[in-house]
Amino acid sequence: MMKKFLTHPIGIDQGETVLFSEFADGGDMWTGEGPRERRAAIRFNEAFRAAPVVQVSVSLWDVDTSSALRAELLAENITPQGFDAVFRTWSDTRIARIRVAWTATGEVSHPDDWDIS
């Protein structure tokens, strides 16, 4: 479904976060097998009027290339205040570290908005 904006101003917020770095300490993203997941709660710099559209992408990955690379990256639990960045892998894929970039676009409040509730 297409997100439509009314006459309100549109805000764009963006950032990056390291979801994990497990090579040095032998974490299970690097040493484990099977389904594994890491998530990070991301807070927007300012709240949107409603849940915005959020796009996530990998901005850095450090992976072992001796097995197939299996990964899923997505945004979950999107609210006007933030979202969860979620990374999943499975089987024998070994991931040393992941950094995620994100962009959120949506309606923002304007100083001239009236609150008539």
Image: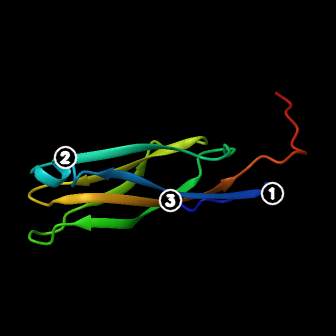
* Residue extending furthest toward the right: 112
Which is more toward the observer, 76 or 22? 22
**Foreground mark, 2 or 3?**
2
On residue 7, the disc is 1
Q: Is residue 107 visible?
A: yes
Q: Is residue 78 visible?
A: no
The answer for how far apart the CA atoms under marks 2 and 1 are is 48 Å
At x 20%, y 47%, the residue is: 25
Q: Earlier in the sequence, mark 2 or mark 1?
A: 1
Is residue 44 placed above or below 2 in the rendered structure? Answer: above
Instruction: Tell me the crowding category of disc 3: few under 14, some 14 to 19, or many 20 or more residues within 10 angstroms, Cα based.
Output: some
At x 61%, y 42%, the residue is: 80
Is the Cβ of the residue at disc 2 closer than 8 Å to that at disc 3? no
Give the labeled residue for mark 2. 27
Give the labeled residue for mark 3. 102
Local SS, label 2: loop
Q: Position of residue 79 (x, y in %)?
A: 55, 41
At x 86%, y 43%, the residue is: 113
Q: Position of residue 15 (x, y in %)?
A: 54, 57
* Residue extending furthest toward the bottom: 65
The answer for how far apart the CA atoms under marks 2 and 3 are is 24 Å
Q: Earlier in the sequence, mark 1 or mark 3?
A: 1
At x 73%, y 50%, the residue is: 108
Amino acid type for the residue under numbered disc 3: Trp
Q: In the figure, is residue 37 to the left or right of 65?
A: right
Amino acid type for the residue under numbered disc 1: Thr
Q: Position of residue 81 (x, y in %)?
A: 60, 40
